Image (spheres, rainbow, N blue to C red):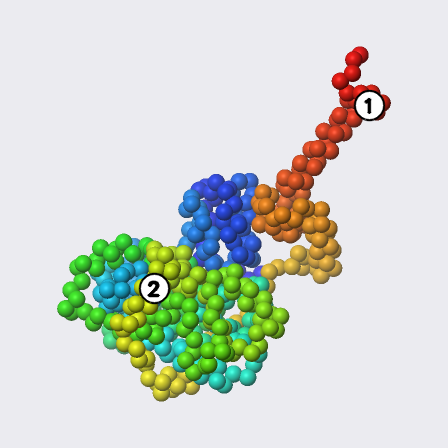
Amino acid sequence: MAARYQYSLRFEPERCDGCTACMRACPAEAVRVRKGRALKLESRCIDCGECIKVCTKRAIVPLTHRMSELAGFDWKIAIPSPALYAQFDPEVLPGVVLAALKKCGFDDVECLSPACDAVMSATEIFLNAYKGAFPLISSFCPTVVRLVQVQYPDLVEQLLPILAPREVSARAAKERKSRESGLDAGRICAVYITPCPSKMVGILEHPGMERSNLDTAVAIKDIFPCLAAALPEVDEDFTQMDGGETASGVSWAFMGGFPRSLPSENTLAVAGLPNVIRILDDIEKGKLRKYAYIETHACPEGCVGGCLTVENPYVARGRLIRLMHKLPSGPAVERDTVEQRYDRGEYLMDEPLSARPMMPLDADISKAIAKMKERDKIVAGLPGIDCGACGAPSCKAFAEDIVLGEAEEENCVFVWRTEITDQIRNMVQITWPPGREQGGGV
């Protein structure tokens, strides 16, 4: 039986007007519009959230949670993405934002910088000892991981097998609270304040882990109104203004946080799915072997460009850069401590990442080959302009849908127009036999 995968987006067909905007925006060709409604092809979806950005009808819903849905836990710990700080002016320091989170209903907060700094050092340790194929590809963005698993299965072994900072931070926070309070870890809820829906799928079905240390995620845009209202109530006299965050930790929210021990000429940073896809194409072709590490972000400018934020990503990036000048510059955790924990395996994934390539046109290889030939024949007869009027994002995708029995050639307006024209011409020939002029008398 085929594996059942988790997803972080849900389509609401009753709200959809069939505008095709989501279909055109999807970089994985995972959306079709049929009978006037958009639907998702789950085998292709990589949970990037590009469809959410362009849907004006709110017909695509991220499966994050709201605060009211967390009442069943005894203790709730918020772990905010550094992108959260970019939603406010740089004068609003992290400590104030963290204090405001408590006023929004969390029992505790955990800043991410110690985990970010630790994971950076762990990445350096791994890279210095690595003997496999280069370049290694960062695995901290769940969308990029899914993209590689689905469309570049041969590159799965080049994904970095280091846990994301949010997982390291959640584990540390739950273990500490369990020791301090005696609460069972299962009654402690670690909540990621997320800039994008893909982090939710990383919780539901964490790649490289049997079970995520996080329990759920709340969208930045959902909690932002509460935070904005709570900020004036925070007594800054009793707040650690930096909140434990560091400049290097906060920098994880945007593109460019290379491992510090590697020379810049051996590393690349890329953000935005079209750019990530181009880089992965080049890696697959063997063009980028001189690079040791490639930092990848599905969202423009990095996590500050997530579809569940409220601020323009370029404004947000500028805010974080200014904020970094106000934060401590040193690492939040000692290198010796990281090395000891690394030797105990605390930063490595529990299990190897696996490919999950798209299903072939048929399980029977001979039938699949026959269907590929049929698809190519159909493509040759299509206009090749990828207009999307058929409800598929490209002529090739439309031809595959026809071969799979999910569409008909007449769905193409150009094929339909040709058929109608031929029918009209035949009718005219029947009405006006050869040798008899149209419009003549009786």
On the rendered image, what quadrant is the C terminus found in? top right
Given contact means CB atoms under 8 Å apart, are the residues at marks 2 and 1 in contact? no
Q: Can residue 388 be seen by looking at this rendering?
A: yes
Residue found at x 71% / y 61%:
365
Q: Identify the residue under disc 1.
A: 433
Q: Which mark is residue 318?
A: 2
Q: Amino acid at mark 2?
A: Gly
Between 38 and 426, the one lying in front of the other is 426
Q: Position of residue 18 (x, y in %)?
A: 51, 42
Between 363 and 35, the one lying in front of the other is 35
In what element is the residue under mark 1?
loop
189 left or right, relative to 262: left
Q: Position of residue 299 (x, y in %)?
A: 44, 61
Q: Position of residue 421 (x, y in %)?
A: 70, 33
394 left or right, relative to 75: right
The vertical placement of 54 against 262, above or below, is above
Mark toward the viewer: 2 or 1: 2
Spatial distance from mark 2 to mark 1, Cα to Cα?
75 Å
Circle 2 packing at 10 Å, graded few (<14), some (14-19), many (20+), is few
Residue found at x 59% / y 46%:
387
Q: Amino acid at mark 1?
A: Pro
Place residue 431 in its image quadrant: top right
Q: Which mark is residue 390?
A: none
Circle 1 packing at 10 Å, graded few (<14), some (14-19), many (20+), is few
Q: Position of residue 381 (x, y in %)?
A: 71, 46
Q: Can residue 178 be seen by looking at this rendering?
A: no
Residue found at x 47% / y 42%:
16
Mark closest to the chain's N terminus, 2 or 1: 2
Residue found at x 42% / y 45%:
56
